[in-house]
């Protein structure tokens, strides 16, 4: 689907859920669809919207992000210690974050289904894994760590 058609489809969902389809919301959704980045901070989104529509107040963009999240159109995720990032909910995925190099790996929602079922059954706890990234080491950093472990230290003279 073309980006303009996706924007219109998302705006139709907003209207169906009782929300308004304003120009500022259209621009915000457009930024989330068209930047080529899937993890934008609120500040990144504000900057991009302001380029397109300089008359839109920053506070309006922040309120729109909150409203779009409440309408189920966007969600934020915490990728490590930096600012929250936002993405469209229709791009449903989970996040793996390399704690060494910062690489973010997107994995299908279904990846955490067995874990969610086990936690629900064993502990009666329902997880929301999309809110946080699972921390660990990416393949490259694991290789580097193994290689570094095999290199003997050079003695100081």
Image (cartoon, grey):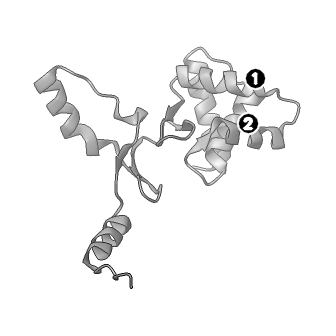
Residue lying farthest to the bottom in this orientation: 157
Image height of 19 relative to 84, above or below:
above
Image height of 83 relative to 111, above or below:
above
State which quadrant residue 117 falls in. top left
Q: Residue at image x 75%, y 43%? A: 48
State which quadrant residue 49 falls in. top right
Q: Is residue 22 left or right of residue 15?
A: right
Q: Earlier in the sequence, mark 2 or mark 1?
A: 2
Which percent across, then down, holds residue 45? 69, 39
- Asked whether disc 2 touches disc 1, contact meaning CB atoms under 8 Å apart, the reply is no
Total number of numbered labels?
A: 2
Q: Residue at image x 34%, y 29%? A: 128
Q: Nearer the viewer, residue 76 or 141?
A: 141
Q: Residue at image x 55%, y 35%? A: 84
Q: Which residue is mark 2?
A: 46
Which percent across, then down, holds residue 10? 59, 33
The crowd level at tag 1 (other Cα within 10 Å; few <14, some 14-19, many 20+) is few
Residue lying farthest to the front in this orientation: 157
Q: Which residue is mark 1?
A: 59
């Amino acid at each position: 689907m073309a980006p303009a058609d996706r924007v219109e489809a998302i705006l139709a969902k907003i209207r169906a859920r009782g929300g308004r389809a304003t120009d500022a919301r259209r621009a915000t959704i457009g930024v989330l669809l068209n930047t080529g980045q899937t993890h934008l901070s609120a500040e990144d989104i504000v900057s991009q919207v302001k380029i397109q529509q300089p008359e839109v107040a920053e506070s309006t963009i922040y309120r729109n992000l909150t409203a779009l999240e409440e309408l189920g159109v966007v969600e934020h995720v915490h990728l490590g210690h930096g600012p929250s990032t936002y993405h469209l909910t229709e791009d449903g995925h989970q996040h793996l974050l390399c704690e060494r190099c910062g690489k973010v790996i997107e994995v299908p929602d279904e990846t955490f289904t067995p874990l969610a079922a086990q936690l629900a059954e064993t502990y009666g706890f329902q997880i929301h894994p999309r809110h946080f990234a699972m921390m660990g080491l990416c393949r490259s950093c694991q290789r580097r760590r193994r290689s570094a472990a095999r290199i003997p230290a050079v003695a100081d003279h």
